[in-house]
Each structure stands twice: as C-alpha cells, then as structure tokens.
C-alpha cells in the first residue's frame, strides 16, 4: 500500500524546498494533495495518462466527464480556449485569482474546458513550478463532502496519493462557483463561494476603453468627458478607462489639464498606462483616435474586431478625415479644437451606451 509523504506548511510562509518537491512529484506523475482558498484538492499532471487514470479511479468519475484545470497565468486561457466572451474576461478581471471556475470552448477539441486560478500561495506556486497543466478536483472520495481541512482530506486518501501538504483550514471552506461561458449567455452551473448576484453584477457592467498613442492627451480628454457625463446621468454600471500604445506613468500634458479645467474637470492625478490584451478582452467598446491605433489593437487581440471604432466616427463634424490628430507639441488653440471634436463624439456615445 502506498503511503503519502505529508508535510506541514505555514500558509503564509511556506518552505520553498517543500514546494519544489511537491511540484517535481506532480510533474513526474504523482498525485499531490494541496490546499486552495476553497477546499483541498488532488493535483495531477494532465499530460500523464497513468496519473489521470488513478485520479478517475479515486474519484469514481466517468471518463467522459473531464476535470477542470488550475492555472497560474491568464495567458493559458488564450492558449487553450477559443471564442471567449467579453463577459468571461470581466469575471476573470474581478475574481481571478479566486473561487471562480469558467467553462470555456476548447481550442484543441470540440469539447469544453474548465479553468480556475486559485488564490492560495501554496497552490499557486506548486502549479507554477510544475510547468505542466494541472487538474485539481476536490480531495474527497465520491459521496463525501469537499474537505475544508487537511484531516478530512487525508483521512481516506493517505494510501492513494504520493504527497500531501497540510496547511491547516482553508480560507473559504466552500467550493468555487462554476460558470458556463460557452453559450450565448452565461449560466451558473454551481453557486459556490461567489454569490450569483456578484456574477450578474460584474457581467452587467459595460466597459469602455479609449486608446491613443501616449495616453496623455486625446484618450485622457475622452475618458474624463465621458466619466463626467455618466456621473451626471447616474450611470454607475458603465466603467470608463483609457490607455496608450507607449510606455506608461506619464502625467496628462499641461495643455490637456488646462482645456479640461475649462470643463470643470481635474486630471492632475492622471498617470498614463500602456494598453494590454487583458484590457481589450474585457472591454465592450474600444474607441481609438487613429487608424494605426485600431490596427495595433487588432494585432494584440484580433477577436476584438467588432468592438473597435474610430472615436471621430461618432462626431458630426463635416470633414473627410476620421482621425483625431495628436495635439502633442501643438498650440493651446489646437488642443481646444481637439477637445471640441472629442466632446461632440462623447456626447453622442453617452446617449448610445
């Protein structure tokens, strides 16, 4: 009979050597009990066929019912899933790492794939160091409750796994909420640690993203103006942000501050940020200033094609140019004209969203 090696770790300062040992055993095909913030789980290398078969036998689970993956980086979603809806990315932004399992369409097969990013340092580090895809169902035999403490996890599994980490009682003690994001609308398959109302509130929000070159002039104006109008309309369900294609941490330009001050808006605390794929993925509408910005966004996230528009398309100004020229380095009068163009587009957008 196999006897699991048991190590007791401080959940806040876990021994690095023990974490490395657990990751190596996991990678080599061993079964490892690890804590998560929800319940204890049995971590297994998904690529090791024998290890996966052992797990199915322990869990008495039908072979046509796959286990969910536990991941440590968001990039894994795009590597393994396809046609991920904006709503799913919104949930990732708010609840990952955390007790949320998303069911998505698999990129490699016609089946679905479940993914979760645990909010537990031990689980996170073991999975990351193993450098293999890890499935991790709850550490209990069929018919028994998912264990929130190590004693319950090891009671029936001590002779069935190879390594086990005792980190005391889990923080939440409740399984993750499972959301199916493969259909036209999201479905909650299991309400766990995250209440249904929080899922619905998050997905109901609209995210608007403005993008320009440096995030110090045009996109700052657009963000500030739209936020002002939405506050006046009491539209708290719409979230607005801006970003640039260049490196961040710049203040708004002095002329940007000056022209917005005339609108009763203070942007002195603004710091620019560089646009990321994650920002684009979680945005319902991306508004850019130039065609080059649109092209860059689509290089970053091709699936955003139907959500990216030139901001000036929403303005009524009668000219053939659909781009809003960068005012950086130009006169205060140029900034004033730029603001007027952006303001007209923003007022129309505020009535549409």
Image (tube, helix red, strand yellow):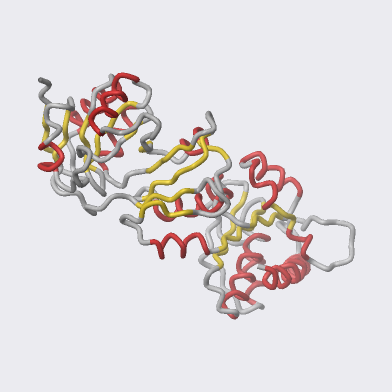
Q: Front-most of 261 and 26?
A: 26
Query: Along the horizontal axis of the image, is 34 left or right of 219?
Result: left
Query: Along the horizontal axis of the image, is 7 left or right of 345?
Result: left
**Residue 274 visible, this orientation:** no
Question: In percent of the image, x 65 and y 60: which residue is there?
Answer: 219
Q: Front-most of 131 and 155?
A: 155
Question: In percent of the image, x 21 and y 42: which residue is there?
Answer: 143
Picture coordinates of residue 210 (x, y %)? 64, 58
Q: Is residue 133 above or below residue 337?
A: above
Picture coordinates of residue 9 (x, y %)? 14, 39
**Residue 340 visible, this orientation:** yes
Location of residue 316 by image quarter: bottom right
Query: Along the horizontal axis of the image, is 138 left or right of 327?
Result: left
Query: Along the horizontal axis of the image, is 20 left or right of 205?
Result: left
Picture coordinates of residue 263 (x, y %)? 65, 78
Q: Front-most of 7 and 319?
A: 7
Quick one: quadrant of the N terminus?
top left
> How many callouts does the rendering have?
0
Location of residue 127 by image quarter: top left
Quick one: quadrant of the C terminus?
bottom right
Question: In percent of the image, x 22 and y 37: which residue is there?
Answer: 34
Location of residue 23 by image quarter: top left
Picture coordinates of residue 301 (x, y %)? 62, 42
Question: In percent of the image, x 77 and y 58: which residue is there?
Answer: 324
Q: Front-most of 16 and 189?
A: 189
């Amino acid at each position: 009979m196999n006897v699991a090696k048991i190590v007791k770790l401080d959940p806040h300062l876990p021994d690095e050597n023990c974490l490395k040992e657990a990751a190596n055993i996991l990678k080599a095909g061993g079964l490892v009990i690890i804590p998560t913030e929800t319940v204890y789980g049995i971590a297994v290398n998904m690529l090791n066929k024998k290890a996966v078969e052992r797990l199915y036998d322990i869990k008495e689970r039908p072979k046509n019912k796959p286990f969910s993956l536990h991941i440590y980086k968001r990039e894994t979603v795009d590597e393994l899933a396809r046609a991920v809806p904006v709503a799913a990315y919104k949930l990732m932004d708010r609840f990952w790492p955390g007790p949320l399992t998303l069911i998505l369409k698999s990129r490699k097969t016609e089946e679905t794939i479940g993914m979760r990013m645990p909010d537990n340092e031990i689980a996170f580090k073991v999975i990351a160091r193993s450098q293999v895809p890890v499935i991790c169902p709850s550490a209990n035999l069929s018919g028994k409750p998912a264990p929130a403490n190590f004693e319950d996890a090891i009671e029936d599994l001590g002779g069935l796994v190879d390594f086990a980490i005792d980190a005391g009682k889990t923080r939440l003690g409740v399984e993750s909420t499972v959301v199916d994001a493969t259909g036209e609308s999201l479905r909650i398959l299991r309400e766990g640690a995250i209440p249904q109302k929080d899922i619905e509130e998050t997905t109901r929000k609209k995210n608007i993203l403005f993008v320009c070159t440096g995030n110090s002039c045009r996109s700052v104006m657009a963000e500030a103006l739209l936020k002002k109008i939405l506050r006046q309309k009491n539209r708290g369900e719409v979230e607005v942000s801006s970003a640039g294609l260049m490196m961040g941490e710049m203040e708004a330009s002095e002329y940007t501050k000056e022209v917005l001050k005339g609108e009763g808006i203070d942007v002195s605390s603004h710091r620019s940020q560089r646009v990321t794929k994650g920002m684009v993925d979680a945005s319902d509408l991306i508004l850019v200033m130039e065609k080059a910005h649109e092209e860059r966004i689509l290089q970053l996230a091709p699936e955003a094609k139907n959500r990216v528009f030139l901001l000036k398309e929403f303005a009524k100004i009668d000219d053939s140019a659909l781009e809003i020229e960068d005012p950086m380095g130009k006169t205060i009068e140029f900034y004033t004209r730029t603001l007027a163009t952006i303001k007209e587009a923003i007022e129309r957008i505020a009535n549409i969203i």
